[in-house]
Amino acid sequence: MSVLTPRARSVNGKHTQVAIYSMGGEISSEQAVRGAIQMHSKRVWRFGLALSGASDVADDLLQSTCLRALERHHQVTTYDRLDSWLMTICRSIWLNEVRARSVRKAQALSVTPEAELIASGPDAETNIFAAEVFTQVMQLPEAQRETVMLVFVEGYSYRETAALLEVPIGTIMSRLSNARQKLKNVMQHDAADAVRRSGK
Amino acid sequence: MKFSDETLKAYLEGNLDGDEANAIEEAVETDPDLEQRLMALDPFAPVVQAVFEHVPAKAPHVDLPEYRTAGAVQHGAGLWRLLAVAASVAIIAVSATFWATRPAPMGWAEQAAIYQSLYAPDTIAGLDNSPQALETQFALAEEQLGRSLKREALEALPGMELKRAQVLSFKGKPLVQVVFADEQGQPFAFCVIRQGEGAPNKGVKQAVLSGLATATWAQDGYGYMLIGSEAQTDLGGQLDLLTTTFAG
């Protein structure tokens, strides 16, 4: 099971840097951006889904984000944290270019989890629970939804998330508190089910 | 102010009153350690993460304009140039993840899976797997590992063509990646790391890492890992053979 896969990635940086200089030679910013796109496309897509609530909009957001990032590769001065840079581009495209025309559609779709998006678990009960959590997250207001996605799913710290979304850290924490209140209902329901089952 | 784990859990579960909750939120602004503790104690994060982790199930498709190298590529050197570009893109991609500063360290298996996830059929299609080349690679790999890689057994894996043995390293420990092509030409890898005497034995554990089906186990100071070409790859047959072959 991968339920507790480490959310966080860290490094053994020294070794890798050696590899870069000895094997890659000079790496251009374009190469770095292409590498980051390849590496983080799933995360950007997922963030696009959280923003828009619709998988076809997430497809478009990912595509636009990657093209925009590639156009701007010369702005990249450090290859550190290209993932948050891609997320920022994705969000800015969403807010400035896509949101207005997608919102009506997103409202219609976000209430129904798209079944094929949910990873299939070992049994039906797990799948039902996953679908409930998925639905509950997708029904959160947009600000809470993007925050939950960045912190809970992608493992960004409150501080990093605050910087990415350009809000104070206190706002991140209160959004998470509000989201937890709503998620609590689903999870308590599930916990109650588990108790009932084990009592049989 | 110091907050106990119980207080932080009560905050995360929404069971603190407004003043206490405010005190925690204010303290976090200047206290990254408190932030890390809260994140680690949050009961909601792992549940939500487990649900969304495999969304989307496959890496989404992105259309990018082709890469144009600066300056003319010399005739004949073109393939090498492309390989060098591919290698450096792969390396920067891996390193971009490595560099991302996050709290928990990643194990060798996670890093091996990330590396392997960058392999495509084309990565292995052109490898020189002549007996001489493999002989040299295996000699080097076995010397680094300090044990036999049982090449005959690896060559006899059903449906797998042995392509290359490559010496890598994880935190100073030798890590050998043996890569195969399956019947469809998809990459399939078997990795062995020398963990040193005293490393605990571990039973076979299967997991999807970086979108690839994997199985890991450890015995007698060595860690082993099988990596399929996608999340759904059935590792069963190879796993049985290899766990038997490398049991001690």
Image: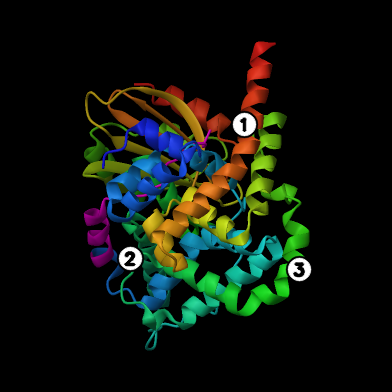
The residue under label 1 is which amino acid type? Gln
> Hey, which residue is sitting farthest bottom in the picture?
B71
Which residue has dot 3 on it? A104
- Crowd rating for badge 1 (residues with CA inside 10 Å; few <14, some 14–19, many 20+): few
Q: Which residues are magenta?
A: A1-21
Tell me the quarter of the picture where residue B237 sits.
top right
The percent coordinates of residue A9 (x first, y second) are 37, 49
Amino acid type, callout 3: Arg
Q: Quadrant of the C terminus of chain A?
A: top right
- Which marked residue is nearer to the observer: mark 3 or mark 2? 3
Q: Amino acid at mark 2?
A: Asp
Front position among marks 2 and 1? 1
* Relative vertical location of residue A146 with respect to residue A166 in this rendering, above or below: above
Residue A99: x, y in percent? 65, 73
**Residue at the image point whose x is 37% and y is 45% from the top:** B177
Q: Does residue B142 appear to the left or right of A169 in the view shown?
A: left
Q: Is residue B4 magenta?
A: no
Examine the structure image and report whether residue A7 is included in the region drawn in magenta: yes
* Image mark 3: chain: A
Mark 1 falls on what kind of element?
A: helix
- The answer to whether residue B209 is seen in the rendering is yes
Q: Marks 2/1: CA distance?
A: 39 Å
Q: B247 or B102: nearer the eye?
A: B102
Q: Is residue A77 above or below residue B175?
A: below
Rounded to the nearest angstrom, the CA distance separating label 1 from label 3 is 31 Å
